[in-house]
Image: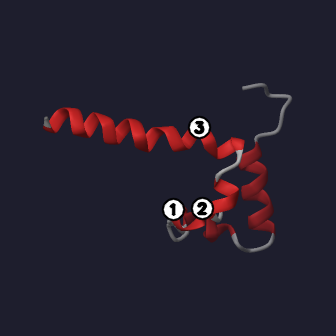
Amino acid sequence: MDPEVPCGWMQIYERLAKLGRADRLKEMPPLRNFRDMLPEGRRRRTSLWALELVAPEVVAEEAEDSVA
């Protein structure tokens, strides 16, 4: 750590303490199911999602090989 660079977490704590909300750091936010946040089908067919489409196929092939 560089003593010249302010700590981000300390700044967050100080700001929340100033607002009287430092206790919020102890709270656990609700967990999210990111599978529900997938984009619609046509957007998943873009080049950004193309790499992820390979993984299920590879997993399926490996599962078939292990059963046979």
Q: Badge 3: few (under 14), some or many (20 or more) residues near its Cα, within 10 Å?
A: few
Which disc, if any, is residue 51?
3
Determine the CA span between mark 2 and mark 3: 15 Å
Residue 25: x and y, percent? 61, 63
> Quadrant location of the C terminus?
top left
Q: Residue at x 28, y 34 (%)?
A: 62
Which residue bears the numbered disc 2? 38
Outermost residue on the bottom side: it is: 20
Q: Are marks 2 and 1 in contact (CB under 8 Å)?
A: yes
Which disc, if any, is residue 35?
1
Which disc, if any, is residue 17?
none
Q: Residue at x 54, y 61 (%)?
A: 34
* Amino acid residing under circle 2: Leu
User: SS class of the residue under badge 2?
Assistant: loop
Q: Are marks 1 and 3 in contact (CB under 8 Å)?
A: no
Determine the CA span between mark 1 and mark 3: 17 Å
Counting residues from the start of the chain, the first of labels 2 and 3 encountered is 2
Outermost residue on the top side: it is: 2
